[in-house]
Image: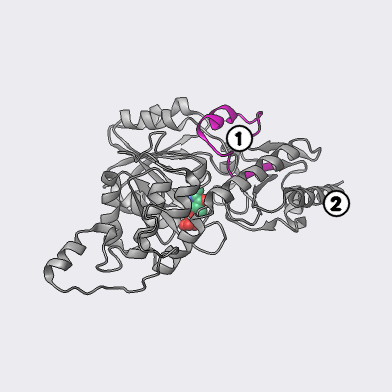
Amino acid sequence: MKRKPEKGLETRAVHGPHIGASGAMSTPIVHSATFSFESLDDMVVEQEQTSAGAFYQRQGHPTIHAVEERLAELDDAEAALLFPSGMAAISTTFLALLRSGDHVVCVDPCYGGTQALLQWGKERFGWDHTFVDSRKPAAFAAAFRPNTRLFHLESPINPTLACFDIAAAARLGHERGAVVSIDNTIASPIGQAVHALGCDLALYSATKSLGGHSDLLAGVVTGSRAHVTPIYETRKVFGPIAEPTMAWMLERSLKTLPLRVRAQNANALELATRLSGHGDVAQVFYPGIPKHPSHAIAAQQMREGFGPLLSFEVRGGAEAALRVVNALRVIRHGASLGGVESLASLAAYTSHKMIGLEGRQRCGIPEGLVRVSAGVEDVNDLWADLEQALAKAVAVGA
Ligand SMILES: *Cc1c(COP(=O)(O)O)cnc(C)c1O
């Protein structure tokens, strides 16, 4: 089922599976929306090639396919599909898997868009779902029902970076007859090999670390051929396929993915460590910090560090956190993560606005929480920026 990786991560990222196939170092961008054939027989052969085919762009396409092959190889999976956004990848996967009356168990708090999708499916398609607290894996089993079709995971969880034992969760899902999917956007395929941990489907917002330069919107699904084929069929029905130029941009980004992820993860760990010793910081949330409740399990199942995201609670609460973010100069204030540029955001105004104060309290998200996605800048500049912003925020508050 799983591909055995024959080459190291960097080699797979740089070359992809077709080293030297055409002689071109960079995959040619084929813009053609349709393709012509010498004979009906030739056309039928292409038509049946699923995503590999050069038949009609919505079904598959040479440029997109080259990137899909590289993504599959990077994630130790048989197959990958590329979508025009992370939400297109997640929603097409759910549409492929779920019928009316099916039940989903989903870790809480999962990505807000995924919560909205589950609510949409409940109202329009008769799906049902139960959220389970990601910090209490012992309670996961109780949420399953005979009609549970999908167990949807996310670890680490934004913005508290709580992690749970992914392999144990995947075993539980399989025992109960569910398909196990995981949104592995935060760690990326470099930071967490989720197929080796037993997940059936890995989902990515490629807008984040995979793209990595805040200049494209994309989504990816990887898994065994058997798991990915129904999603391919669903993509054909609804039509959310990536277009060739974006696919090429993503492929270009993938070549430096291991380098970027390692640099981001190293910067995140350094910032989290320094913030832990800062007097104006009440609490640091980063699984790389030995004090973090998920440190042991994260150290076991993550690799190449602990991800680019860290959060910290500023003394002085929501107002102080807002002043910190407004005072940052090198670290830019904006939503998103995983790019080469460091970004800061306030969970209460972005990713966790929708769930309200009560929802944030339920998930253990303090109001004074600042989330930082570490980029690849010089860590001393990032630290100096955080120090001056904290000093300003506290001086005003005093
Ligand atoms: C951004 C994000 C998504 C959604 O991806 P888009 O590319 O914005 O559609 C899904 N899951 C996680 C964890 C994300 O961070």
Q: Is residue 9 above or below residue 147?
A: below
Which residue extends farthest top?
Answer: 138
Q: Percent x, y for residue 196?
A: 40, 35
Q: Which residue is mark 1?
A: 287
Q: Is residue 299 magenta?
A: yes
Which region shows up in magenta?
288-312
| In-front residue for pair 7/277 | 7
Image quadrant assignment for residue 89: bottom left
Determine whether, in the image, residue 26 is placed left or right of residue 122: right
What residue did someone put label 2 on?
Answer: 396
The verdict on residue 217 being magenta is no
Closest to the observer, 238 or 368: 238
Q: Are marks 1 and 2 in contact (CB under 8 Å)?
A: no
Q: Earlier in the sequence, mark 1 or mark 2?
A: 1
Question: Image point 62% across, 49% down: which residue?
Answer: 347
In percent of the image, x 53 and y 41: which residue is there?
157
- Element type at mark 2: helix
Q: Is residue 113 visible?
A: no
- The reply, left or right, for residue 282 in relation to residue 153 is right
